[in-house]
């Protein structure tokens, strides 16, 4: 840190601002130029302050009254830009254009560096006849030919972001037949026109928000949604010409986005399979163990009660041996259906514990309520007629053990709740089956 402090002091000598953050995005070090660039932080920034708080002060001075309700969205996107930035970008800041770069410092965190690149036009320089408003008429023929051969959409704008030229792929990408009609228009108008007559999706609205933000922070690549499920990534190349011209590359990433979505769905499916019993569709033993640990600690924290039902199909081996395993599977599926239909609250969790054993975890549930739920389940199962042409209609019964831990017993192990329910279950078996016993 001493070396970084010396570097920060040296950067002060050349009017370069710097701020250093640890791996948790907490402020650690900044120089005097940083406070000159961002006076809103003077006397307010402190060591250990999260970058999000830094961003809130920054945006509160820059967002319009209409944009302020979206402050937290801007902060969240700014944090992601900070964490993932790989190339520099620019933004207008008071009277100057500022370029910023963020570099990862291995396990230490990140360093952000800002420098002024050019003074912004004053009101006088914006008047008609000002030399800053002179616009190039066209590209050199060989340059235009080269850009037309690129597979990506290319757009050239002037210093005021008015379109000067686009290539054929850009016109095709945004459904534009006449490239000349684009001159003097801004890209946000072209983008909105591409959606004209189309249903405005959530992706479109999010893209409009992203586009507005990138007008403040140019240089950072961003993605925009197009109709028919298409996507483009926009990369800005600013400051390449003295007359203010800049180029934008629009890359079709539709195939990549579809692959990402397929991968996301596959990942979710695999994650679901990892905690789901294939036969019954209930949570499996692994998911139950995770939930038990979470709910046990929550009960201890909230001083609440936690109930557990241990359920077993009576004479299941006889059912399998007599009527076959497919019929045994059907019995388990019917029991799972009853458990699923019994659950009414989001936190309740029915699960297949193993073989013909099932459990029902009931957070914040008193013993008498858990017993009533167990009796309801037992009666529903006993009242069912399960069978086929070969077996005929059969009555199935289950035995249930109930246990409940009060908050003053939660400091023991969660395993005791399972042990008590299991012991109560076997007591139901010894008493003749088709019973509910409280442990």
Image: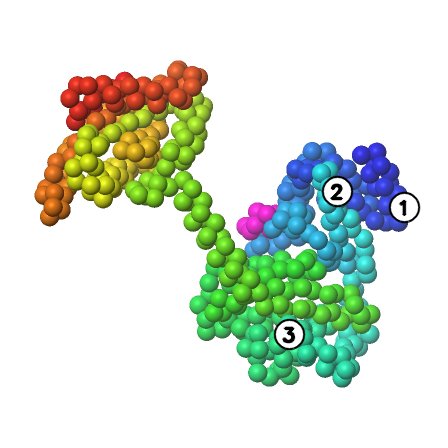
Q: Quadrant of residue 216?
A: bottom right
Q: Which mark is residue 151?
A: 3
- Please give left or right for residue 78 compared with residue 385 in the image: right
Which quadrant: the C terminus? Answer: top left
Mark 1 / mark 2, whichever is N-terminal: 1
- Please give left or right for residue 48 compared with residue 316 in the image: right
Magenta-span inclusion, residue 71: yes
Q: Please say if 74 is above or below 199.
A: above
Residue ID at (37%, 37%): 284
Q: Tag 3, which secondary structure?
A: loop
Residue closest to the eye, 51 or 233: 233
Residue closest to the eye, 350 or 62: 350
Residue ID at (35%, 41%): 277
Residue range highlighted in magenta: 69-76
Residues at circles 3 and 1 in contact by the CB criterion of under 8 Å: no
- In space, the residues marked 1 and 2 are separated at their CA atoms by 23 Å
Residues at circles 2 and 3 in contact by the CB criterion of under 8 Å: no
Pair 3/1: label in front = 3
- Please give left or right for residue 102 compared with residue 275 in the image: right
Name the residue carrying label 2.
Answer: 105
- In space, the residues marked 3 and 1 are separated at their CA atoms by 45 Å
Name the residue carrying label 1.
Answer: 13
Residue ID at (30%, 43%): 279
């Amino acid at each position: 840190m001493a070396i970084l402090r010396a570097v920060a002091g040296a950067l002060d000598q050349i009017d370069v601002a710097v701020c250093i953050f640890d791996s948790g995005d907490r402020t650690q070090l900044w120089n005097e130029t940083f406070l000159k660039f961002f006076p809103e932080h003077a006397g307010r920034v402190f060591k250990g302050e999260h970058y999000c708080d830094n961003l809130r002060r920054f945006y509160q001075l820059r967002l319009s009254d209409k944009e302020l309700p979206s402050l937290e969205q801007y902060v969240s996107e700014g944090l992601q830009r900070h964490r993932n930035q790989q190339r520099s970008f620019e933004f207008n800041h008071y009277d100057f254009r500022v370029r910023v770069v963020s570099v990862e410092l291995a396990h230490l965190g990140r360093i952000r560096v800002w420098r002024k690149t050019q003074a912004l036009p004053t009101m006088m320089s914006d008047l008609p006849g000002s030399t800053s408003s002179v616009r190039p008429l066209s590209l050199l023929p060989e340059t235009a030919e080269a850009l037309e051969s690129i597979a990506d959409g290319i757009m050239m704008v002037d210093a005021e972001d008015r379109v000067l030229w686009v290539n054929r792929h850009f016109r095709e990408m945004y459904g534009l037949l006449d490239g000349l009609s684009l001159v003097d228009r801004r890209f946000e108008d072209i983008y909105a026109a591409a959606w004209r007559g189309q249903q405005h999706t959530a992706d479109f609205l999010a893209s409009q928000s992203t586009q507005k933000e990138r007008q403040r922070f140019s240089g950072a690549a961003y993605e925009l949604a197009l109709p028919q499920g298409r996507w483009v990534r926009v990369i800005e190349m600013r400051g390449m010409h003295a007359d203010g011209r800049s180029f934008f590359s629009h890359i079709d990433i539709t195939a990549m986005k579809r692959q990402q979505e397929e991968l996301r769905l596959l990942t979710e499916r695999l994650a679901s399979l990892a905690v789901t019993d294939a036969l019954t569709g209930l949570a499996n033993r692994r998911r139950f163990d995770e939930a038990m640990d979470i709910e046990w600690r929550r009960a201890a924290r909230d001083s609440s009660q936690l109930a557990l039902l241990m359920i077993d199909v009576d004479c299941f081996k006889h059912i399998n041996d007599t009527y076959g395993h497919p019929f045994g599977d059907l019995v388990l599926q019917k029991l799972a259906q009853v458990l699923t239909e019994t659950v009414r609250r989001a936190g309740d969790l029915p699960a297949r514990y193993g073989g013909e054993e099932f459990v029902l975890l009931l957070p914040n549930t008193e013993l008498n309520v858990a017993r009533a739920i167990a009796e309801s389940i037992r009666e529903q199962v006993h009242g069912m007629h399960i069978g086929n042409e070969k077996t005929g209609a059969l009555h199935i019964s289950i035995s249930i053990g109930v246990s409940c831990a009060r908050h003053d017993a939660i400091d023991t192990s969660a395993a005791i709740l399972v042990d008590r329910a299991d012991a109560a279950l076997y007591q139901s078996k010894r008493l003749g089956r088709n019973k509910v016993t409280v442990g």
